Image (cartoon, rainbow, N blue to C red):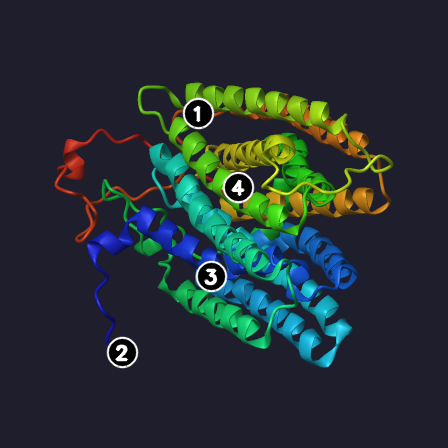
Amino acid sequence: MVSLPIPGWYRGPMVQVFMLGMVCFCTVGMFSALNALGAGGTQDIVLVDISNSVLYGVFCIAGFFGGSINNILGHNVTLFIGTLGYMLYTGSLWCFQTQGSRWFVIFGGAILGFTAALLWSAQGSIMMSYPKEEDKGKAIGLFWGLFQAGNLIGSIIAFSLNLKNGGLDAVQTSTYLAFIVVMAFGTFLTFAILPPSEVRREDGTRVEALSKTTVADEVTGFISLLKNRQMLLLIPLSFASNFFYTYQGAISFAVFDASTRALGGILSALASIIGAQILGWVLDIKFLRRRQRAFVGLAMVSITVIAVWSCGIAYQMTFSRTNPIEPKYNYKDSKNAGTPLALIFFYYIMDAFVQSMAYWTMASLTSDTFTLARFAGFYKAIQSGGAAIAFGVDAVATPYMSEVIVNLVLLLVSLPLTGIVMYGIKEHNEDIVETEKVPGSADNGKGSLEDKEMVDVETLPRQ
């Protein structure tokens, strides 16, 4: 079979991260967009809450093994399987809308929990290992911006429907079909992403030159992961990184009417995109050494966390579950709605800072795709476990003030531990790299490898 030549520009890491972002825009992004329409478009909040609980529970368990599955199957197959769950879940919502089959929605949530673990393990491996060390912050920002663009689109649609109809009705069959078509396109795009061996960095180096792993390798690697001091220190950050979503969603519902919640969704998506670009740029500043960049980023995140959550505590003093806001605020009432809308915006700036810092820190520990796949799966597993617990905490009507304080405490505990990990960051990762000049690599006329100063590297065990 004749294979088409791959253009040099397409082999570039940032192009591959862009393609990965488009895969997640079409799948995860559209899933977020559907959720922005309210209860997955079904208007049955209880059913979707149950399904999401099952989803996060399965995601938590599967995430621990997602990286190993990715390493055995390869990025393309893992991404392909990972995207299928989003179509199935959307189809289950469509089926419920037309046939009333509640069990299918819950089953779809369970399947999505498993496939999402695969998708995010592969995603993390590609995003963290393909770019050069000095470009990893920008790569995270690029991916996060594309991924959050789906959420932005969904929120704009929800806001427009509210303006037109005065509320959100159940989504029509044609809308579900449109989402499924977009998700199917994202599934197709998974095969447009190049394997590590085909990627060439700007200086002509390969991402890696390791052969495929085996089940025995992955068992050993998984055991080593559970003993990895750096990843164990990142557990509190992983746990806290999605824990606050439940509280933020709860107060949004408590404070805003439907149209203002949709506007809040637009602001949160924009904030996520902006925040990831800002911190990504800071973490790639050229004139600072790697560890210095890490601590500058950590300082930014810490200041933002303390400032935003302090404002959150102050605002939370104005209402509670037993003393609710009545009537709920509309965005046209700028005197009352302006402050909580601004708070929502900065909550998601903080969120993007936390997520970007977590990924960049893991990416600074190694550039090995196999190891980073395990790191990503482990991170998402703990993160999903935190989200599931947070959902349960809110479901039993825990006082809002207790929730906001718990969120702040979790983050304050995690940040110093993350600093300990950052202190051990080296200027360069000691992973296997091929340094020969490769025809068609994205050299951009900057000279051959012989003219460049190369860092000596050594082969590390995959675990």
Q: Residues within 10 Å of mark 2 (few under 14, many from 20)?
A: few
Q: Residues within 10 Å of mark 1 (few under 14, many from 20)?
A: some
Q: Check disc 2 and give the amino acid type.
A: Met
Q: Where 417 falls versus 448 (above or below)?
A: above
The residue identified by callout 4 is 267
Looking at this view, name the residue that lies furthest to the bottom.
99
Q: Check disc 1 and give the amino acid type.
A: Lys
Q: Looking at the image, which residue is at 23% across and 76% down? A: 2
Give whichever of discs 1 and 2 has the lower sequence position: 2
- The image quadrant where one finds the N terminus is bottom left
- Along the line of sight, the residue nearer the viewer: 69 or 324: 324
Q: Looking at the image, which residue is at 29% across and 44% down? A: 434
x and y, in percent, of residue 409 in the image: 72, 25
Tell me the tag on residue 196: none
The residue identified by callout 2 is 1
Q: SS at mark 2?
A: loop
x and y, in percent, of residue 273 in the image: 46, 41
Q: Check disc 3 and give the amino acid type.
A: Cys
Q: Looking at the image, which residue is at 60% across and 73% down? A: 172
Give whichever of discs 2 and 4 has the lower sequence position: 2
Give whichever of discs 3 and 4 has the lower sequence position: 3
The residue identified by callout 1 is 426
The residue identified by callout 3 is 26
Q: SS at mark 3?
A: helix
Q: SS at mark 1?
A: loop
Q: Check disc 4 and give the amino acid type.
A: Leu
Residue 214 visible in the shown view: no
- Along the line of sight, the residue nearer the viewer: 250 or 222: 250
- Along the line of sight, the residue nearer the viewer: 302 or 313: 313
**12 displayed left or right of 31:** left
